[in-house]
């Protein structure tokens, strides 16, 4: 009986607080629109890939029959700082930690037999994107938006200094990368915070190949990062 009474009190209290937070015209959290700065966090998943081109003068080109780079799932988390320049325009800085993975598969012929060699490339990156966010005017508790910007990334798991003469060769990429981003999403205002769902694409600008003429690197002329991000954000 005491449990039922406690549950009822909690429900009634939340109901009263919820109604108190709803302003005129049914808008949740009206104070949010009057703030010039907002902070929050982002949680998400990603799939990482590469745009690549091959060398015409590769030493193993004759035996190589194909390269496949398979996207693998990863995740990311970030801290949001947002400056409202205008009602519908804001600048955002979202430093993030992301875990990414790609699987390289090299198909080649050895003594007349078709074979496949694999190498799994894992990256742990610190990402520093600066974004412009353009959104529609708020429709009660909903708005749509588009984002674009640039990002610098530092790969903490880069094996750029690994000695390739020891053991099996690996895929080596540079530690520093730059990319541009485009995407969009939807904002939803709740009684005490705003959350959003967001999808964006990052395309690398810099060639990150470290060419050392080993089996995995010799055929590659260029590697440029490509990452899809899906995030849920919370701001207060």
Image (spheres, helix red, strand yellow):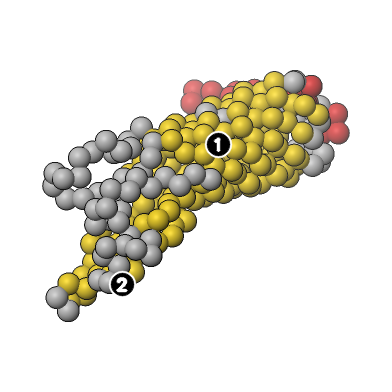
Q: Is residue 48 left or right of residue 117?
A: right
Q: Nearer the viewer, residue 123 or 47?
A: 123
Residue beneath the point at 23% across and 62% down: 117
* Mark nearer the N terminus (2 vs 1): 2
- Where is residue 184 shown, x and y percent of the image? 66, 46
Screen quadrant of the C terminus = top right
Give the Cα distance between marks 2 and 1: 35 Å
Residue beneath the point at 27% across and 36% down: 161
Judge whether 85 appears above or below 136 on screen: above
Q: Nearer the viewer, residue 179 or 219?
A: 219
Callout 1: SS: strand
Circle 2 packing at 10 Å, graded few (<14), some (14-19), many (20+), is some
- Where is residue 85 shown, x and y percent of the image? 77, 26
Q: Which label sits on residue 113?
A: none
Callout 2: SS: strand
The image quadrant that residue 18 belongs to is: top right
Observer able to see residue 231: yes
Q: Which residue is mark 2?
A: 65
Furthest-front residue in view?
Answer: 57
- Where is residue 101 shown, x and y percent of the image? 36, 48
Residue beneath the point at 72% across and 43% down: 145
Counting every numbered tag in the picture gives 2
The image quadrant that residue 111 belongs to is: bottom left
Q: Nearer the viewer, residue 62 or 94?
A: 62
The image quadrant that residue 155 belongs to is: top left
Q: Which label sits on residue 151?
A: 1
Q: Nearer the viewer, residue 111 or 101?
A: 111
Judge whether 2 appears above or below 174 on screen: above
- Foreground label between 2 and 1: 2
Judge whether 111 appears above or below 209 on screen: below
């Amino acid at each position: 009986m005491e449990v039922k009474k406690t549950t009822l009190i909690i429900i009634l209290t939340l109901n009263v607080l919820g109604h108190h937070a709803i302003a005129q015209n049914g808008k949740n959290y009206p104070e949010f629109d009057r703030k010039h700065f907002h902070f929050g966090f982002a949680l998400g998943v990603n799939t990482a890939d590469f745009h690549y081109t091959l060398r015409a003068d590769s030493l193993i080109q004759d035996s190589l029959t194909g390269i496949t780079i398979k996207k693998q799932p990863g995740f990311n988390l970030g801290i949001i700082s947002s400056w409202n320049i205008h009602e519908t325009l804001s600048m955002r800085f979202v430093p993030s930690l992301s875990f990414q993975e790609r699987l390289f598969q090299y198909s080649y012929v050895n003594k007349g037999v078709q074979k496949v060699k694999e190498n799994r490339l894992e990256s742990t990156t610190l990402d520093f994107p600066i974004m412009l966010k353009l959104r529609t005017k708020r429709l009660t508790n909903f708005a749509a938006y588009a984002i674009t910007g640039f990002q610098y990334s530092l790969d903490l798991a880069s094996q750029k200094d690994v000695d390739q003469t020891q053991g099996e060769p690996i895929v080596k990429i540079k530690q520093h990368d730059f990319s541009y981003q485009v995407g969009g999403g939807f904002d939803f205002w709740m009684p005490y915070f705003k959350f959003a769902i967001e999808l964006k694409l990052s395309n690398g600008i810099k060639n990150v190949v470290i060419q050392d003429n080993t089996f995995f690197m010799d055929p590659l002329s260029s590697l440029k990062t490509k990452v899809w991000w899906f995030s849920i954000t919370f701001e207060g």
